[in-house]
Image: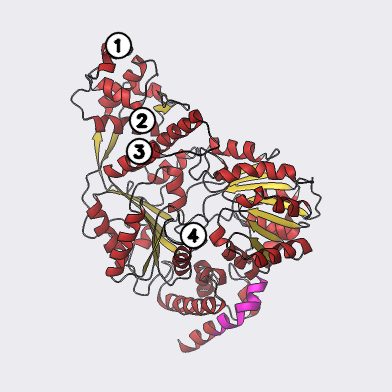
Amino acid sequence: MVETMADMNDARAALRQYFGYDGFRPGQEPLIDAILQGRDALGVMPTGAGKSICYQIPAVLMHGVTIVISPLVSLMADQVAGLEGNGIHAVCVNSTQTPEEQSLALAEARSGRCKVMYVAPERLDTQRFVEFASSLDIALVAIDEAHCVSQWGQDFRPAYLGIGDFLNRLPDRPVVAAFTATATERVRRDIVNLVGLHDPQISVTGFDRTNLYFDVIKAVPTVKRQWIERYVTARPDESGIIYCATRKETESLAADLRAHGVKAVCYHAGMPPEERHAAQRAFVNDEAPVVVATNAFGMGIDKSNVRYVIHHNMPDSIEAYYQEAGRAGRDGLASRCTLLWSDGDIATRRRFIEMENGNERLTDEEAQAVRNRRRVLLDGMIGYCRTTSCLHQYITSYFGETGTVKCSGCSNCDGEFETIDVTDIARAVSRCVHDVNQRLGAGKIVQVLRGSDAQEMHDWRHLDSVPTYGMLRDVPAARVRDVISQMTSDGYLAVAEGKYAVVVFGPRAAETVAPDFTMTIKQVSRPVAENDGGDGATYGGSGNGSGAAGSRRSRGSVPAELDGEDADLFVRLRELRTEIARAAGVPPYIVFGDKTLRDMCVRRPHTDDDFLEVNGVGQKKLDQYGERFLAVIRDFEEGE
């Protein structure tokens, strides 16, 4: 166990000194306290909840260096710049550096001059790095995006499976802390077991993002594009991410937006590295407000002022959607997450699953089990699109949170759909699962219920003789499949893990035979109104401010909480931030986030001590930027 004299009082002082915050966010203290006491930790916290603070604070208080294992090679320089901007010396070692740059970074870590070193998981397999690490005084190994270790996670990365071996090869095992934004109970178990965490402190923070407005719209591809064009062109100064399923779609949509006068960049894995890097830098630096991308973009993006995330296509899991949509509103300000989907998206996602080659670490049987698991994950995503319940509630329930969530803004609770009563179909499905002894997959159940004439119905287990054979002969197969997906999402059914995706009864199965059982699904043919994506009138009427990101602002992306002179001051402070960031060659959020600028507008600091009271201003940033920002505030007030 690592000995340390630091305690939570020291941690709070470091938080104020380096980051300018007066208190920790929910979930941070138990993790930091455990790490300081030498105990392993696992933190599951939503995007924007402050996972990095949980290892950065211990890093400055503990002896030696903290190694951060991160898959985000393209963002490591930004992460290092962020720490340096707060007065914490950090380095990174990755494949984009020259050998001389790598050697310099390793020398800084070996000398003890730096407190944090970022490395990619692939580097842990190299003998050179293992020998180097074995000679270091390592206080903590922090694993970012830890869900990548699990084959059940949406971003499985085989190199993460080597982390446990790396830790075992070190002469003295340091404290190990793993962090992720999206992890079901199964993925959490995998993280603990595969990384080899020892009796970890596990902190799971609430998954609800109350500042996000969730919206689901079914539309054909041409209408999707029209909606996006209207929405984006109505917000020329707001920062947004648009996700597409294919590289071709990202290029086409980005070109369309540029033709409409939008500064949009494209990002996908098929682009040359230098073009991807340029697109990412343009977006992060606020030079291009919109990026159109595949899911290759965004993991770990620390841009705090993304005001909207639009999905042009359905993702393949709630985990993926929650992580991607969660890149909106990291600063806690009102933002919007819109999912546009069609039946074609479902077919595309199912085709992707069947084409998946797996990886060399898995046997054929394990690869088939992974494909089955991905089918289950997709069913959860389909359920999100079709559910009639609160979208916030759906997400939190999916991740295992119990209790009722008070909706802070979603299109379902705003009543923007019609419903279809599918009670009789759901009862028939439940009876069929019983008739076949919970031994068939969803496809076969649909065939039985619709009285398929396929020879296998007659030859295999005499399925044509079960009581429910042909009971739903007049119901379209797609409708039956939709109901099965919804029943699985709602817990009436479940899908057994293993080689075959067998449909079994879920924890709520008994409810389907109760006399008062009813079930509805969403009628998803709602037309897209002309003002959907325009002034936000269709979606912003919850009265709680969550729809604020859906309203056009004459002064660009000004926080909804500011108006009048405060809003004008915000624009001036943002201009100064951009000027400083471009001169220093760093993203604007490295200087200050929108939330900090907003606090300056409200507080109107006049002295250094006043400036230190602003949320997000530590001593280093006061020294670097305080005089210039105070001057802008002073000049603004004198000119009022």
**Quarter of the image that includes the N terminus:** top right
Judge by depth and name the residue closer to the eye, 407 or 261.
Answer: 261
Image point (37%, 62%), residue name? 548
Q: Which residue is mark 4?
A: 332
CA distance separating discs 4 and 2 = 34 Å
* Residue 141 rendering spot, x and y as whole percentages: 69, 50
Q: Secondary structure at mark 2?
A: helix
Q: Which residue is mark 3?
A: 350
Res 40 seen here: no
Amino acid of disc 3 = Arg
Q: Secondary structure at mark 1?
A: loop
CA distance separating discs 1 and 3 = 29 Å
* Residue 405 rendering spot, x and y as whole percentages: 45, 44
Which residues fall within the magenta stretch? 617-631
Disc 3 versus disc 2: nearer the observer: 3
163 to 10, vertically: above or below: above
**Quarter of the image that includes the C terminus:** bottom left
Sequence-wise first label, 3 or 2? 3
CA distance separating discs 4 and 1 = 58 Å
- Do residues under tags 3 and 2 come within 8 Å of each other at their CB atoms? no
Give the farthest residue toward the left. Answer: 474
Sequence-wise first label, 1 or 2? 1
Sequence-wise first label, 3 or 4? 4
Judge by depth and name the residue closer to the eye, 245 or 511.
Answer: 245
